[in-house]
Image (cartoon, rainbow, N blue to C red):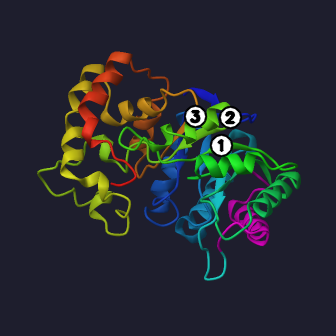
Amino acid sequence: MQYRRLGNSSLEVSEIALGSWLTYGGAINDETARECVRTAFDCGINFFDTANVYATGGAEAFLGDMLSDYRRDEYLLATKLYFPMTDSDRGLSAAQVHKQIDASLARLRTDYVDLYQCHRYDDDTPLDETMHALTEVVEAGKARFIGFSEWTADQVRSAMSLPGVSRFVSSQPQYSMLWREPEKEVIPYCDRHGIGQIVWSPLAQGVLTGKYDPATPPPADSRAANDSMSGFMTGLMQPRVLAAVQDLAPIAADLGLTMAQMALAWVLRIDNVSAAIVGASRPQQVRDNASASGISLTPETLTKIDQILGPAILSGGD
């Protein structure tokens, strides 16, 4: 496992991070989830990402229990807030920032998180209120650093221009071979201002593993076949997208890589990407994904990938 500095922070994060969206705290049984986390440590993964809303606190509670077996300096822990926890608890108001960090720390069984992230931008709360509240969380020692997920470059720019507040060190965008929107504005701005990317869905919800054949229904045990998990997959499951992904298989085979390893190496080709967040429902998935760390793709390989995917690359209208 190789490690990268997360933006302008002092955090050295593993290139592969283990996420807990749609997996831990409910979707898979706890013993399998525990084995996935143990395998992550064995593979050198030191970065674990979660959010208060995942399994409505269940993912944080699972990690709090599981990580209590390890020394606090053996891992880096990130969580998020914004989405509703109850009918009245949502958003990034000062009251919510303070309430939700305390609730997250209780579930995670820790005095602090290494990274506290705004899960989305809150149009209903003044930005300076949010940023001053996050700064208070950092000053209280409850979070070492702060970040955001899925903010626009203009929103980030506004936050970074405020005086007297903590600075963001991380961005968590959706980013993959098939979804490249962050390359337009967010990544360039962040690169200039010391904000590192920890990207989610680098495997495009599993599509880039090549397991979905455009000519056949999705496997019964796959995310695409599960109504509660497939909400983000509509554009990704278009036949033209699946067909193009199948055409990537020979490239991966020639390199001696799995499709997943090639897709992870692709996002990590950018220095500003500090880590790629992967989910895993089996320990072997953790091992396979972790082995993508340190793989470099040649310019020729990158050109071939672009030529094959071409029209299949999704945009904001897909």
Between label 2 and label 3, give the one nearer the viewer: 3
| Figure quadrant of the N terminus | top right
Hey, what amino acid is under mark 3? Pro
Residue receiving disc 1: 170
Quadrant of the rendered structure where residue 252 is? top left
State whether residue 169 is above or below residue 239. above
Q: Is residue 62 visible?
A: yes
Residue 11 place in picture, x, y as percent: 71, 36
The secondary structure type at the circle numbered 3 is helix
Hey, what amino acid is under mark 1? Ser
Residue 76 place in picture, x, y as percent: 68, 43
Q: Is residue 32 left or right of residue 166?
A: left
Hey, what amino acid is under mark 2? Gly
From mark 2 to mark 3, how far is it between C-alphas? 13 Å
User: Residue at horizontal 53%, vertical 68%?
Assistant: 55
Quadrant of the rendered structure where residue 58 is? bottom right
State whether residue 126 is above or below residue 318. below
Viewer-proximal residue among 154 and 298: 154
Tags 1 and 2 touching, CB below 8 Å = yes
Residue receiving disc 2: 7
Residue receiving disc 3: 188
